[in-house]
Image: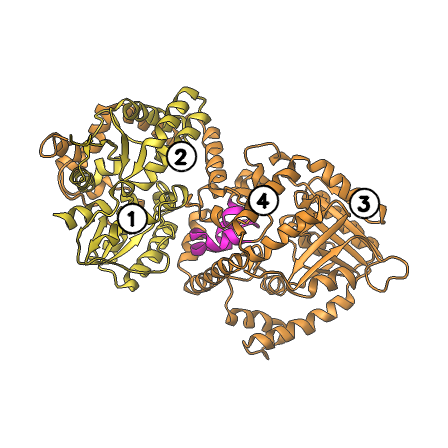
Chain colours: A orange, B yellow
């Protein structure tokens, strides 16, 4: 596994990536601001949403229980998956029982999280992503670089090159032509697939429904054309009432893309009933824990408020430089930097808690007001507590704390640069500073020295 | 009868004590010109933010507790900090820090001190003076987002004859300093500085101004490395020059 610095070095040196990132993040951050301005009380809605999410999480087992009971009463199979392996095994089993050779998927970060496509692929089942961005990166054998815009790191030219692997070099880079080609290819897969797998934006407990919010028609096809539909939902992605959903629907598209509403909002409450024309014969809901219940009740619980809009990525100055792949994990940006260390093994999370300047732009952009910078700082504290007493950084801070809590030692260590020399000797400045920056050049004598002399008095 | 002078306890910050004495000196001169009685509590050292942001709360608390005592004991009406980030540490994060380490006595002292704490620009109002420059103002993160201070520095600059403030994209985007982030993740930190510097250079401004010397030190370091001679000044230096 590469380090954050290694990935960052590659990202900042990639000029095409830099252009794509700057263009996309500027565009979506601007659209988000415009979207927020289309409701007068956007700030009040954010505050309300924060409390709605907190209220649901406070009684999560009950809310999930109601959702599951109501779905089951209409014949939906509900599976509680404790981890990724459990979820994958269940989904594979269902697909195999359906005799599936092809599975179509609409966008699902939860399925990315558990690497579902690998499991299906290993069993000889072709899983086809049908969200355009997801399909592009699937063909390119990459992972999503953004929560809602998985191929955001690619330019139009890149995309044409990827699709030409399938088209055999006949496509230009005109978006309409590329889209038409994708539609034609994917339509065939929809018709062929025995199983459709979707994500879930929100479960709504009071009626036992799962809601999918999309801009591409693929979500409807995935959930209605194949005979079997499997929905995969992170266990925290649930609401109690439709009134709460209305609030989330006012916020999610505005924060994500600046839209007042998405093209499609589908609520699914069960398989096709007798006499109904559309819908699958069989429906399954996989409720995925995979580490989430370990976050409940901790100082990090608020990360489970996340509604996966991607707004924090678009405003993050670190994401803007390194893109989603720079984080080296399924979830990127500020939310990924918090979520990954909590959901994954320590070695996979690396030092993601340090992939932030704690600038707070994410918190300001978040439609449910998650204090992401506070959570990142909490993770740094956790990491520091776990550090052994022999860790270099721990010893350095101990020495620092001892010196700087004594005025004499503080003066001795700070005064040198200002009083004795007007230029800080280069060798005193950390190498990692000097690589890209010149050393500071103090203008004048020591401040405290000045206060005691020329600046004395009041 | 003359009005009683506002007594100011100035925490110069470790950045001023280490590498930017000129900012401390300018701060004192400007505040005194406004009629304030400015003193530096001898024993005060650092706010503890470097260790706090690195996750080492106990070490941060050790230093912060010492400075808290020095500031709380100072006979002052106001505590002035010429750095948005350190002002935020004292005003917003100290109570949290002391709570995290279980020192509730210090937490209460910090909460009582917080209302007296002012970032420098909050004290200068329509400072006034003459400053014939186009300025690019850098909004630093903690000052803008935690303290909500956008207008006070803009107002101080607007009060100067001859001074224009450039409108530039990314004025309120993080510069990439981020304390130890600047050396733990130097590639990202420098790339973020370049993003800012590109915007500043395109704005046509003749001076870069800010209220956090740490951000300015980082941006100036990058500007010089790129061969630029663009002057970089703390707001206090600008006001001092404008009034001299």
Q: Is residue A342 left or right of residue B87?
A: right
Question: Would you say residue A122 is visible in this rendering?
Answer: no
> Magenta includes A439?
no
Q: Determine whether the residue tagged by mark 4 lies in a helix, strand or loop.
A: helix
Position above or below: A94 against A295: below
Marks 3 and 1: same chain? Answer: no
Q: Is residue B148 left or right of residue A299?
A: left
Position above or below: A240 against B52: below
Q: Give the residue number, with chain letter if any, for mark 2.
A: B92
| Figure quadrant of residue A302 | top right
The residue segment tinted magenta is A310-337
How crowded pointer 4 is (Cα within 10 Å; few <14, some 14-19, many 20+) is rated as some
Question: Would you say residue A32 is visible in this rendering?
Answer: yes
Label count reads: 4
Earlier residue among tags 2 and 1:
2
Q: Give the residue number, with chain letter if any, for mark 4.
A: A48
Earlier residue among tags 3 and 4:
4
Q: Determine whether the residue tagged by mark 2 lies in a helix, strand or loop.
A: helix
Q: Residue A323, percent across and down? A: 48, 56
Are the two marked residues, 2 and 1, in contact with CB atoms closer than 8 angstroms?
no
Marks 1 and 4: same chain? Answer: no
Q: CA distance from mark 2 to mark 4?
A: 24 Å
- Indicate the chain on which mark 3 is placed: A
Q: Give the residue number, with chain letter if any, for mark 1.
A: B153
- Indicate the chain on which mark 4 is placed: A
């Amino acid at each position: 596994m590469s380090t954050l610095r290694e990935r960052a070095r590659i990202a900042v040196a990639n000029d095409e990536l830099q252009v794509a990132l700057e263009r996309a993040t500027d565009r979506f951050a601007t659209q988000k601001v415009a979207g927020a301005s289309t409701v007068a009380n956007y700030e009040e809605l954010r505050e309300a949403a924060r409390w709605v999410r907190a209220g649901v999480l406070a009684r999560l087992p009950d809310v999930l229980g109601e959702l599951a009971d109501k779905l089951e009463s209409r014949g939906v199979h509900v599976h509680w998956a404790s981890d990724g392996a459990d979820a994958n095994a269940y989904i594979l089993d269902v697909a195999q029982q359906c005799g599936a050779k092809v599975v179509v998927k609409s966008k699902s970060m939860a399925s990315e999280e558990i690497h579902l496509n690998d499991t299906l692929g290993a069993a000889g089942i072709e899983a086809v992503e049908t969200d355009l961005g997801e399909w592009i990166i699937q063909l390119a054998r990459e992972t999503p670089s953004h929560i809602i815009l998985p191929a955001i790191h690619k330019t139009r030219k890149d995309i044409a090159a990827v699709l030409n692997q399938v088209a055999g070099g006949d496509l230009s880079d005109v978006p309409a032509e590329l889209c038409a080609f994708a539609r034609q290819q994917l339509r065939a897969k929809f018709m062929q697939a025995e199983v459709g797998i979707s994500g879930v934006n929100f479960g709504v407990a009071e009626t036992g429904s799962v809601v999918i919010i999309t801009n591409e028609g693929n979500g409807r096809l995935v959930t209605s054309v194949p005979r079997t539909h499997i929905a995969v939902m992170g266990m925290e992605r649930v609401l109690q009432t439709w009134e709460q959903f209305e609030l989330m629907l006012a916020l999610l598209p505005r924060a994500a893309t600046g839209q007042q509403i998405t093209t499609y909002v589908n609520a699914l409450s069960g398989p096709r009933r007798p006499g109904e024309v559309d819908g699958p014969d069989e429906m399954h809901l996989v409720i995925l824990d995979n580490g989430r219940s370990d976050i409940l009740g901790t100082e990090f619980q608020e990360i489970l408020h996340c509604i996966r809009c991607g707004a924090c990525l678009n405003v993050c100055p670190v994401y803007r430089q390194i893109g989603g792949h720079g984080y080296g994990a399924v979830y990127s940006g500020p939310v990924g930097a918090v979520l990954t260390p909590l959901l994954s093994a320590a070695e996979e999370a690396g030092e993601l808690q340090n992939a932030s300047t704690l600038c707070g732009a994410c918190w300001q952009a978040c439609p449910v007001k998650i204090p992401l910078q506070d959570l990142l700082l909490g993770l740094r504290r956790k990491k520091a507590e776990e550090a052994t007493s022999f860790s270099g950084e721990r010893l350095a801070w101990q020495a620092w704390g001892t010196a700087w809590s004594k005025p004499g030692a503080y003066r001795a260590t700070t005064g040198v640069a200002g009083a004795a020399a007007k230029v800080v000797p280069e060798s005193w400045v950390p190498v990692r500073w000097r690589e890209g920056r010149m050393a500071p050049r103090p203008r004048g004598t020591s401040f405290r020295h000045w206060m005691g002399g020329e600046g004395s008095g009041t | 009868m003359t009005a009683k002078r506002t007594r100011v306890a100035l925490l110069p910050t470790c950045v001023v004590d280490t590498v930017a004495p000129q900012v401390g000196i300018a701060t004192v001169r400007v505040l005194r010109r406004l009629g304030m009685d400015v003193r530096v509590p001898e024993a005060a050292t650092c706010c503890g933010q470097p260790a706090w942001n690195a996750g080492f709360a106990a070490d941060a608390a050790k230093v912060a507790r010492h400075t808290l005592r020095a500031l709380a004991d100072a006979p002052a009406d106001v505590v002035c900090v010429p750095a948005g980030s350190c002002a935020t540490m004292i005003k917003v994060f100290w109570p949290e820090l002391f709570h995290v380490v279980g020192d509730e006595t210090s937490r209460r002292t910090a909460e009582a001190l917080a209302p007296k704490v002012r970032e420098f620009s909050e004290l200068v109002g329509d400072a006034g003076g003459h400053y014939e420059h186009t300025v690019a103002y850098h909004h630093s993160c903690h000052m803008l987002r935690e303290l909500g201070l956008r207008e006070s520095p803009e107002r101080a600059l607007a009060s100067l004859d001859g001074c224009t403030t450039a409108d530039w994209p990314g004025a309120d985007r993080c510069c990439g300093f981020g304390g130890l982030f600047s050396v733990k993740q130097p590639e990202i930190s420098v790339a973020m500085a370049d993003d800012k510097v590109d915007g500043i250079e395109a704005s046509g401004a003749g001076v870069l101004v800010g209220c956090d010397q740490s951000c300015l030190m980082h941006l100036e370091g990058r500007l010089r490395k790129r061969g630029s001679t663009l002057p970089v000044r703390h707001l206090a230096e600008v006001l001092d020059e404008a009034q001299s």
